[in-house]
Amino acid sequence: MERLDDIDYKILEELKRNAKAHYREIAEKLGLSITLVFKRIKKLEQAKVIKRYTIVTDDDKLGKSLTAFVGINVRPSDADKVIEELSKMHEVTELFKVTGDFDLLAKIKVSSTDELWHFLYVKTTKIKEILKTTTMLAVKAVKEEL
């Protein structure tokens, strides 16, 4: 696929705000024709720029208002096993291989410090391949992309 242009990015932003937006709604908001919006979205889907359409839930309403980031150190040979185990845990909402002081970085969503403690000191300690964890508690989200 050729490089994305400003129109593609504007369409993507509208779909990020509302994945259920109709072509007509996007076209009117951006001052484009419905046909152009339709063709661009189809092109973005075929190129797998748009992977899927999904929902965004309100974590507070789900009782998951506490966010923590856990830096995890593992031996390189154990990374895949740790990733597999962490990926099964509902508290882990995002998981990354990273460079720097950690090997993995997990975003954790829980309802309380008690639940965070249980995750850190009961659940993850069962994964023997984890050498060390460092936890950072998010006190305020200042920017979150969907």
Image: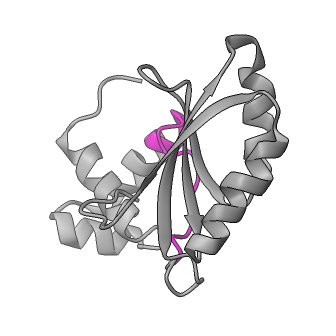
| Position of residue 60 measured from the top left corner of the image (x, y, whole percent) | 49, 82
Quadrant showing the N terminus: top left
When asked about the image quadrant of residue 109, the answer is: bottom right
54 relative to 47, above or below: below
138 relative to 127, above or below: below
| Position of residue 7 measured from the top left corner of the image (x, y, whole percent) | 22, 47
Q: Is residue 69 covered in magenta?
A: no
The outermost residue toward the top is 77
Q: Is residue 55 covered in magenta?
A: yes
| Position of residue 102 measured from the top left corner of the image (x, y, whole percent) | 50, 26
| Position of residue 124 measured from the top left corner of the image (x, y, whole percent) | 74, 46
Residue 53 visible in the current orientation: no
Q: In the rendered view, does 145 fall on the left or right side of 136? A: left
Residue 35 visible in the current orientation: yes
Count of number-bearing discs: 0
Residue nearest the viewer, comparing 134 with 94: 134
Q: Which residues are magenta?
A: 44-57
Residue nearest the viewer, comparing 120 with 62: 120
Q: Residue at x 75, y 12 (%)?
A: 77
The outermost residue toward the bottom is 61
- Main secondary structure found in the magenta portion: loop
Scheme by which the image is coloured: one colour
